[in-house]
């Protein structure tokens, strides 16, 4: 009985990780499948990676990937800048006003993407704006801002206000205080915001589907259209590459933060 109590937490954690990462492991394994458009394993091959962007399907997949990365990069950077400015502005307000504004920015985080997508579609239609990449970028920025605020605001609350006051007492201007004191202190929140909003933008399907015309196609939209004709190993290969890249970025970021904490602990 004692042994069971000891190993029960380990088994529980192992089951959780299996539930989360087993589908990804299957995805990566089948990206090397030699049989096209099949769930049946037919042998090991690298052809799915070598021929990933070859042919008409590959060219369309590559174009969709470029569009997705461009939109996600713009949306993540702009939404993070807006969030930094918003959080800095809210920090000078009263506690009650801060809580009210923060709760308002939190509402889109729990709102279904379907509602947000339809709302922006109606807004652009009402304004008479032609749907395309511009409307896609604007809708993604608005979608990402609340998540960016959620990442940056806690770091700003942890910031010691005496640091900025001390910097200005020593002769620093407001811009120098912001650039040399405040921004470096909240940089982990900014990095988290960039990673989170970039991932959210790349992953989005519903908002993109409602706010572009037929000439623009993001990667989730392209993958969804490909699944109608069966499982394509190229789709598995591209998804595996994206997972490995994002996992590598997160791992490097965490290692960097751990090293910084270790240096602070030594000092």
Image: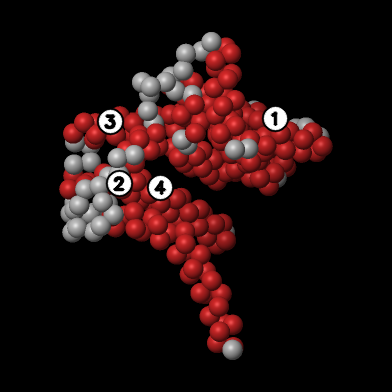
What label does residue 70 carry, if any? none
**Residue 137 visible in the displayed image:** no
N-term mark: 4 or 2: 2
Give the label, 4 or 2, closer to the camera.
Answer: 2
| 93 vs 135, nearest the viewer | 135
Q: Which residue is mark 3?
A: 60
Image location of residue 176, percent across then percent down: 60, 31
Q: Is residue 117 visible?
A: yes
Residue 93 placement, left or right of 125: right
The spot of residue 24 in percent (x, y) is 38, 55
Give the number of the mark in front: 2 or 3: 2
Q: Earlier in the sequence, mark 2 or mark 1?
A: 1
Q: Which residue ends up furthest to the front in the rendered image?
A: 229
For marks 3 and 4, the one nearer the N-term is: 3
Q: Give the mark nearer the N terminus: 1 vs 4.
A: 1
Q: Which residue is mark 1?
A: 89
Task: State the residue at coordinates (42%, 20%).
Answer: 213
Disc 2 crowd rating (10 Å Cα; few below 14, some 14-19, many 20+) is some
Q: Looking at the image, which is closer to me, 80 or 238?
A: 238
Residue 45 image point, x, y percent? 18, 54
As drawn, is 56 to the left or to the right of 8?
left
Residue 231's tag is 2
């Amino acid at each position: 009985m004692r042994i069971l109590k000891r190993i029960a937490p380990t088994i529980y954690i192992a089951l959780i990780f299996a539930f989360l990462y087993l589908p990804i492991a299957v995805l990566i394994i089948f990206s090397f499948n030699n049989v096209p458009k099949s769930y049946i394993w037919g042998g090991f091959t690298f052809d799915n990676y070598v021929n990933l962007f070859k042919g008409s399907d590959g060219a369309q997949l590559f174009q969709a990937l470029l569009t997705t990365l461009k939109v996600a990069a713009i949306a993540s950077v702009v939404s993070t800048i807006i969030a930094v400015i918003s959080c800095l502005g809210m920090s000078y307000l009263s506690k009650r006003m801060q809580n009210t504004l923060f709760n308002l920015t939190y509402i889109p985080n729990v709102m279904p993407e379907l509602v947000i997508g339809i709302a922006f579609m109606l807004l652009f239609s009402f304004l008479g704006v032609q749907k395309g990449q511009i409307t896609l970028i604007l809708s993604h920025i608005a979608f990402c801002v609340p998540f960016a605020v959620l990442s940056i605001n806690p770091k700003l609350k942890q910031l010691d206000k005496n640091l900025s006051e001390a910097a200005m007492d020593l002769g620093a201007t407001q811009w120098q205080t912001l650039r040399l004191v405040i921004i470096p202190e909240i940089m982990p929140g900014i990095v988290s915001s960039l990673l989170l909003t970039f991932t959210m933008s790349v992953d989005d399907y519903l908002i993109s589907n409602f706010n572009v015309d037929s000439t623009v196609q993001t990667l989730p939209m392209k993958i969804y259209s490909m699944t109608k004709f069966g499982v394509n190993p190229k789709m598995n290969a591209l998804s595996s590459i994206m997972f490995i890249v994002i996992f590598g970025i997160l791992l490097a970021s965490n290692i960097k933060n751990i090293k910084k904490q270790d240096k602070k602990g030594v000092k």
